[in-house]
Image (cartoon, rainbow, N blue to C red):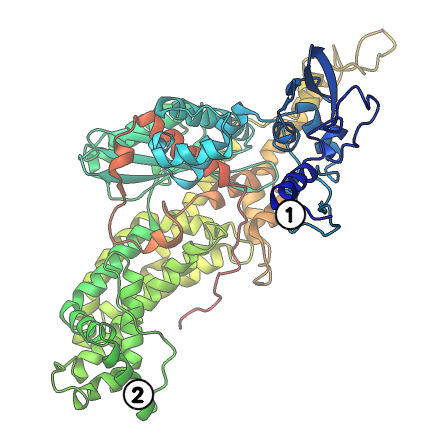
Amino acid sequence: MDTSPIETNALVNVEMQPEYFDTPMNDVETQPTRRRKKKSTVWEHFTIENVGAGVRRAVCKECFQSFAYSTGSKVAGTSHLKRHIAKGGCPVFLHNQDHNPSTPFSAPTNKAANSGGSISNTPKRRYRTPAVSYSDFEPDRCRQEMAQMIIQHDYPLHMAEHTGFMAFVHNLQPNFNMVNFDTVQGDCVATYLSEKQTIQKLIDGMPGRICLTLDLWSSYHTTGYVFVTGQFIDSEWKIHKKLLNVVMEPYPESDSAFSHAVSTCLSDWNMEGRLFSLTINQPLSETGINSLRGLLSVKNPNILDGQLLLTNCFARSLSCVAQEVLKSGEETVKKVRDCVKYVKTSESLEEKFVALKQQLQVISTKTLSLDDHTQWNTTYEMLLAASELKEVFSCLDTLDPDYSKGPNGEEWKLVDTLCTYLKLLFNTASLLTSSTVPTANTFFHEAWKLQLELTRASTSEDQTISMLTKPIHESFDKYWKSCCLMLSIAVVMDPRFKMKLVEFSFTKIYGDEAASFLKIVDEGIHELFLEYVALPLQLTPAFVDVVNGESGDVKQDDDGRGLNNGLGLTDFDVYIMESTSQQSKSELDQYLDESLLPRSHEFDVMKWWKLHKVKYPTLSKMAHDILTAPVSTVFGDAVFDTGAKEMDRYRCSLRPDTVEALFCAKDWMHNEPVETDDSVVKMEFPI
């Protein structure tokens, strides 16, 4: 039987929607019981209910919501029903999906046939849930995640009001009500305050004292921001380094800027009397130092009359020395830079340069590249690579007549000399770029060797070397004199070296005058030890309970009195503690008299003191404060910076408390207890 195209299309449409009619298109009264089987899987989740004359609605079996289905001969179809199940409209179905995500909603494959028995080429539409399970929409959690995202990635707070971002979020979740700048700012501050409670518990529970570093950032509108970072040790002898405050200073050049930042930090974290040392990223005037010491003398025990209180940033000092080195050969460095620029800015010339290098059979291990003026290590690497290729540079004019002459033979010798001293600085500064934090004892080795080399060079009989290194030595000598005592005491706390390395190094540096400098260190460490002996002993909770009579297991004597009462053991316990305290005064001498430990790169000085804290109870407390003291205010690639950091214009436009919240929360969300490492210590001593 032939069928017209119109009839065929009608039949196909009917077959594509088997749920369209509940009964055949014939008269309902002639075949009241004939119903076509519904093939769509949507009916696994819905039932049909008659709600009026000719009006039927589809009711969800899960959440019992009803939807329009048919009115008279007009049928609504099932697309909206499928969206209710598949697109997250049904909360009960979503909950069940979380517990059984392996049952996605899908429709079977359709093969519609025409009246002639052929298979239709029109595919049936499929509706399938995503492979991942649905979860309940939580607006508060979304806001929290947005705040954390902004903090972690330094996104601007105004991003929440950007049109593109708002459209993106709306397409992901139309039910999320976008927030404005003020709301995002409040959410970020709330995240900061929540994280701050955790940090406060760490600080409250630290067994020793805290060391602070102060790093001053400038800004375009002349205000400054002091970044106050705390470094301390917990009861497990793990070092924690946390950014505690970012204090906006209207007059950063004033003598009171740093003292105000320190006072703010101590008050904010309730740390009065628990500060051990300060490390600052720039020299202070005498008035500024006195202002800081005057403030701390009231709120903090005076450790060695403040001699350990203030130390200069090691990284900044090395950068200053490096700039002195480069300044001494400024014209030659510029010639080398021009040569490298000439080769690297032209692809054809670079190819010629490589070909000439191969022709001359020059072996180079370094990559030639232009330097970054803000990072002195890049200039050192440029000079080092160019020095290895000086033979190629000298012959480059044979290939290119327009090439201007580079450095001559004497100037290349100067480049080699500059690289010699820059290498010393580079190797020392590289210790601060490690992911692990070297303990303070590590830097004595690097500092005294650098001081020795510069002292020898500045007094060299070679006038060229002497004139070149005198200003360099003067620059580093300022750091050595201000931090020598602190570094020396730190290395004495290393059982592999103790006073022996100090004696060895001072003899090399000072010669016949070494004895007077050794006396300063010896007296300093003994005086510091006596101050720790005078500190009150920390009682264990069990002992405190016994002394206060709060123990529930007090044994009674024959008279019914506790042994801790009357003629009991309380006075005896106090006597034992006092006598132990008297004996502990000799801990330092006992420690110094013992043999040195064998040197090993795997040695962990903090772990050693943790294991020996019972043998040296007072000395171990002193050790973990000294070894924890940071020598630098910056770490990572920032140790090579030649200038101070500057706050960007956007953050300067925010409220100071918001700036502090953003920086501190980011640090805390990424910052875990850091590993210590003194295996980088080199055991090579110049003779």
Mark 2 lies on a secondary structure that is helix
Quarter of the rendering containing residue 168? top left
Q: Is residue 447 visible?
A: yes
- Residue that badge 2 annotates: 355
- Going from N to C along the chain, the mark reached first, 1 or 2, is 1
Circle 1 residue:
123
Mark in the foreground, 1 or 2: 1
Q: Is the residue under label 2 in contact with that under label 1 (CB below 8 Å)? A: no
Q: Amino acid at mark 1?
A: Pro
Q: Residue type at mark 2?
A: Ala
Where residue 420 sits: x, y (%)? 30, 72
Residue 144, horizontal then vertical, whole percent: 50, 28
The answer to whether 418 is drawn above or below residue 654 in the figure is: below
Camera sees residue 243:
no
Q: Nearer the viewer, residue 376 or 43?
A: 43
Name the residue nearer the viewer: 316 or 466.
316
As displayed, is residue 485 above or below residue 542?
below
Q: What number is the disc on residue 55?
A: none
Q: Residue at x 54, y 28 (%)?
A: 198
Q: In the rendering, at what x and y percent does residue 511 appear? A: 33, 64
Q: Is residue 82 left or right of residue 177?
A: right
User: Vertically, is 433 above or below 327?
Assistant: above
- Report the quarter where the C terminus lies: bottom left
The crowd level at tag 2 (other Cα within 10 Å; few <14, some 14-19, many 20+) is few
Horizontal and vertical percent position of residue 14: 68, 36
